[in-house]
Image (cartoon, rainbow, N blue to C red):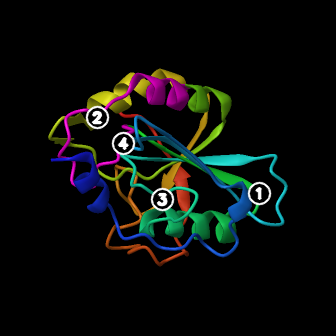
Amino acid sequence: MSDTMGARMQGKPVPHFEQVDLERVRAVFVRGRTHRALLKIPFRHRPPASTLCLVGQNPSDAGEEHADKTVRYLERYVHERLPQYGAMLMLNLYTRVDKRKEFGDVEHPQADRILRCAIRRHQDFLFVFGQLKNEGKYRFPERLRQLQPLFIGKNLLQFDLATDFPPHPGNAKILYSKLDVGLKPFLFVA
């Protein structure tokens, strides 16, 4: 499958949430936009001092120009429910832009360095990656275990839906729209 075809198969682009400061949105892609290392999303009329990092499985092609339904929901949720944050930083366990999890080049050294640096630099994380299972070349449970030491001493959260995994915004109890979802601590299981 060509990279161009893979890019077309990403989630439908949607506008960023209206309270996003579009002039300051910054995406870091590597290797011809096939890997997104991070997506920094500042909010209008908020001091930029504190950032909430959100951690998903793998990214869409959302960037400066557009979001996707997951990113837009998270923008709205953070802006409306967590006013203490002036920005959000979208990170992913894997950096390959791959909606259907079909590609083999799921990691990129430069993107991985950027991801690890972002984890070290920030304190607050909301995990939104859903149930982790192996899919194609993606070894999500193993990847989370690899990154786990970087999260020691951090403030780790997940949506509180009475699950033992951090629900994704596409979860049936959220469906990219419900904002009355609380948060609870995320705990690594042994």
Residue picked out by circle 3: 159
Q: Residues within 10 Å of mark 1 (few under 14, many from 20)?
A: some
Q: Can you say whether 175 is above or below 123 in the image?
A: below
Residue type marked 1: Gln
As measured in the structure, the alpha-carbon distance from the residue carrying label 1 to the one carrying label 3 is: 17 Å
As measured in the structure, the alpha-carbon distance from the residue carrying label 3 to the one carrying label 2 is: 26 Å
As measured in the structure, the alpha-carbon distance from the residue carrying label 1 to the one carrying label 4 is: 33 Å
Residue drawn at x 23%, y 55% is 5
**At numbered mark 1, what does the secondary structure look like: helix, strand or loop?**
loop
**At numbered mark 2, what does the secondary structure look like: helix, strand or loop?**
loop
Q: Position of residue 51 (x, y in %)?
A: 70, 47
Q: Earlier in the sequence, mark 1 or mark 4?
A: 4
Q: Position of residue 110 (x, y in %)?
A: 47, 25
**At numbered mark 3, what does the secondary structure look like: helix, strand or loop?**
strand
Label drawn at residue 34? 4
Q: Is residue 24 left or right of residue 161?
A: right
Residue type marked 3: Phe
Residue picked out by circle 2: 106
